[in-house]
Amino acid sequence: MGLVPESLVQAAADALRARGWRVTTAESCTGGMIAARLTDLAGSSDWFERGFVTYSNDAKVELLGVPAETIAQHGAVSEATALAMARGALDRSLAQVAVAVTGIAGPGGGSAEKPVGTVWFGFVVRGQQPFAALRQFDGDRAAIRAATVAHALERIAELTEPPGVLV
């Protein structure tokens, strides 16, 4: 996991710790890499609550409560699914922040509409409006997954910055 700088992990940890918040993850294309990277730091039990690896559509439905209709209508790699994953993770945890990722890491599985490297992120901070972000990453499977982890960590740090801190 050396492709994701330690500084990104530390920034997310520091921001969560400053607020007294914990994070939960809901991961598909990264297969638990965000949770693994977050828990690489000693003391992560102070700010990491739990992680869900929901690689299959059935797991998204069963573990996170993503409506099967959402996946059928929009696809597993979509804004709607990423948001439903994040909401489901937050609802099934004691965390204040949830991040969800669903994408196409390749090398196969892409299409003209959703090429390899397409990743949807869902973010929820308890009591705030959920939001999603779409990113298109280049490279091989390892590079796409590392870029996904890095982006998730950057956003966790931004979302949890204490009030009055400019990001």
Image (cartoon, helix red, strand yellow):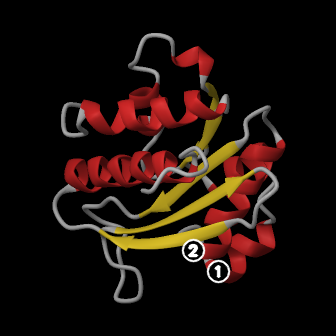
**Quadrant of the rendered image containing residue 51:** top right
Mark 2 burial class by Cα count in 10 Å: few <14, some 14-19, many 20+: many
Query: Which mark identifies residue 160?
Result: none
Residue 20, percent from left and from top: 67, 28
Element carrying mark 2: loop
The amino acid type found where label 2 is placed reads: Ser
Q: Does residue 55 appear left or right of residue 68 in this picture?
A: left
The quadrant of the rendering that contains the C terminus is: bottom left
Looking at the picture, tell me which residue is in the foreground, 155 or 14.
14
Q: Does residue 26 appear left or right of residue 156 in this picture?
A: right
| Identity of the residue drawn at 37% across and 55% down | 151
Question: Real-space Cα distance between discs 1 and 2?
Answer: 6 Å
| Identity of the residue drawn at 20% across and 52% down | 143
The amino acid type found where label 1 is placed reads: His
Count of number-bearing discs: 2
Residue 24, percent from left and from top: 64, 37
Residue 138, percent from left and from top: 20, 67
Give the farthest residue toward the bottom: 112
Name the residue that disc number 2 marks: 78
**Quadrant of the rendered image containing residue 105:** bottom left
Query: In the image, is residue 93 above or below residue 166?
Result: above
Looking at the picture, tell me which residue is in the foreground, 10 or 108.
10
Give the farthest residue toward the top: 42
Residue 3, percent from left and from top: 19, 39
**Quadrant of the rendered image containing residue 81:** bottom right
The quadrant of the rendering that contains the N terminus is: top left
Query: In the image, is residue 105 above or below residue 120?
Result: above
Query: Which mark identifies residue 74?
Result: 1
Query: In the image, is residue 150 above or below residue 112?
Result: above
